[in-house]
Image (cartoon, rainbow, N blue to C red):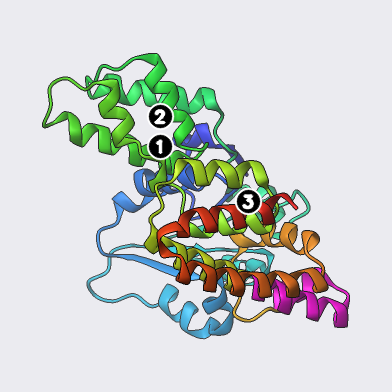
Amino acid sequence: MILKAFEINKINLNKNSLFLLHGENEGYKNEILKEKFEKNYKNQIYKYNEKEILENKYNFFNSIFSKSFFEDKKLIIILRATDKIKDTIEEIIEKGIEDIQIIILSNILEKKSKLRNLFEKNKELVSIAFYPDTVQILNSLTINFLREKKISISQETVNLIVERSRGNRENLNNELQKIENFSKTKSKITNQDILKLTNLAENYDVSELTDNCLAKNIKKTSHILNENNFTSEDCILIIRTLLYKSKRILKIQEQIEKKNNIEKVISDFKPPIFWKDKDILRKQINKWSLKNIKYMILEINNTELTIKKNSSNSLNILSNFILTQASN
């Protein structure tokens, strides 16, 4: 059965036991998970990664179908699910479950996905897709939140808050929470207060900077550098992260030359690559040949030495290097 995300209130929690929440809007999924499901369970919430279920199905089934004297009902949450979990879910359906709800969280599932089709074609199962929030939706959420909390700020500042959330509902909620907490200690909040509170540097981390550099996304890379207040101490962390990710691309390119199958190499790579990192990694692989990434690694090592010898100018050295690599 297919439901739209905004139709979530139509769910009969007493009737339906299996739910598939899929899509890239992690903030919205987590919001629904907490408000509609987790609040109904006290200490009876169990979370599993798909991988650990598949590696030890016996223990997983034992945790589902066994029931202690003190348990009334429990919630099972399966994280990072893919089509690989479909057969296990079918086994659960065949065995039948009582006093249990199972929530399956997945990233984007194509229409041909076996897991998605299983849930969409069965009236007893619930499939909900969570698409990215539009600027209008985030704007509305912000205005409603501020109105409810009786916090008065201008539309211009609302737009700034939404922009700095980067289209991410979780980021937006974090910023709004900071504003609410601040409002409890100050009766009037100025635009300058908001600018200080919604510091974009807190939203961009080192991993995102290095990922976009290696994906040669010069616009995003430049934006992250400009919006962050990196210190000289951050430079070594950034350059080491860049080195680590470059070496990963090198290993993958070497495997691709042998197997000539990008998806299989990514899937089999050790340590495992999380699903959320796979899209940006594919872009990086397409941007760097085996020869070029070897040269890049040498340049990173040389740049690290230069940074260490010129600590007073390390930020400029690092920024110039990153921007040059992202634009080439």
Above-or-below relation of 24 to 81? above
User: Which of 37 and 18 lies nearest the eye of the viewer?
Assistant: 37
Q: Which mark is residue 161?
A: 2
Dots 1, 2 in contact, CB < 8 A: yes
In this view, the residue in front, 74 or 308, is 308
Viewer-side label of 1, 2: 2
Q: Is residue 264 magenta?
A: yes
- Crowding at label 3, few (<14), some or many (≥20) Cα neighbours within 10 Å? some
Q: Quadrant of residue 201?
A: top left
The quadrant of the picture occupied by the N terminus is top right
Label 3, on which residue?
A: 323
Whole-percent x, y for residue 310 in the image: 46, 65
Is tag 1's residue or tag 3's residue first in the polypeptide sequence? 1
- Residue extent of the magenta highlight: 246-268
Query: In 3D space, how far apart are the residues under numbered discs 1 and 2 (Cα atoms)?
Result: 7 Å
What is the distance, in whole Å, between disc 3 and disc 2 at their CAs?
Answer: 27 Å
Identify whether 149 is placed above or below 83: above
Q: Which residue is mark 1?
A: 172
276 horizontally vs 326: left or right: left
Disc 3 secondary structure class: helix
